Image (cartoon, grey):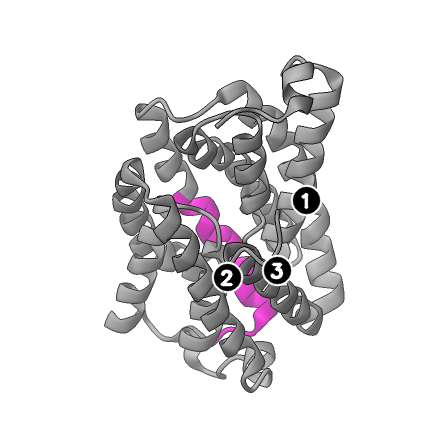
Amino acid sequence: MEALPFFQQHDLYSWEVISVLIGAGLLVGIINTLAGNGTVITYTLFLLMGFDTYIANGTPRLGVVMQTLASSLVFFRKKVLKVRKGFLLSIPVVAGSLGGAQIAASLNETLLHYTIAALMLVMMCFVLYKPSRWLKGKEGRQTEKLSIKEIIIYFLIGIYGGFIHIGVGILLLAALVLVSGYDLLHANALKVFIVFAYSPFALAVFMLNSQVNYSIGLISSIGNLLGGIIASYIAVSWGARFLQWVLVIVILFSAARSFGLIGF
């Protein structure tokens, strides 16, 4: 894909381009932490910079690792992150992500875009149907051991997350609330931790396949890191109802974009 004129006219390491990269990373960090699907911003940006699909898919993982590490630390300090359950839930997700990252080498972009759009609309139905379920979770379910159903669901989400990170946060939120029984605030903290757990493994696969631009990815990661910290404090302070409506807005935007109703 040919780069936009802006990126053709400026050196990739000029202050103009660096500002765009950090600004995009900041938005991604905030959106990913509060809901999910923010990675579509850096994915699209890297395509507009002239990188191929594989680099655009692999490079944002650097920022995701930085962002989720910072957010997890904030959620842990605020006592809303259940680390032990996070480790247990991460095991099938990590296993699935390794397979998904390997599959990503043969992306079919057209099919992928419509699949993402359909998934976003399904998630929106879950959010809008009996919204109290997203706010309160299921009392007592959180302390149970992982069921076979949960292991399968989180493994499949891991495959998707390894394949393409876009939208995985929303899928994890749906599973954590509707399957595992967490309220949206605690589910959001667990979501961030689980993504942090599997992302280095998926990133390693892309690194081995030379599908990561380290310098561009690390510059963008500065914004991811700041955005993750800011959004973590917002999530804790404003609570589950605020997160619910952020999630609805992100899902609507994502579905509209994937169906071509908006240009970005």
Mark nearer the viewer, 3 or 2: 3
The Cα–Cα distance between marks 3 and 2, rounded to whole angstroms, is 13 Å
Q: Mark 3 falls on what kind of element?
A: helix
187 in the magenta segment? yes
Residues at marks 2 and 1 touching, judged by CB atoms closer than 8 Å:
no
Sequence-first tag of 1 and 3:
1
Q: Position of residue 236 (x, y in %)?
A: 70, 61
Q: Which residues are magenta?
A: 181-198
Residue 253, label in figure: 3
Amino acid type of disc 2? Ile
Q: Which mark is residue 27?
A: 1
Mark 2: few/some/many CA within 10 Å (<14, 14-19, 20+): many
Q: Is residue 32 left or right of residue 140?
A: right
Judging from the image, what secondary structure is the residue with disc 2 in?
helix
Q: CA distance from mark 1 to mark 3?
A: 14 Å
Identity, as a three-letter code, of the amino acid under mark 1: Leu
Which residue is found at the position 42% from the left and 79% from the top?
141
- In the shown orientation, is residue 182 left or right of residue 207? right
For residue 172, what is the image quadrant?
bottom left
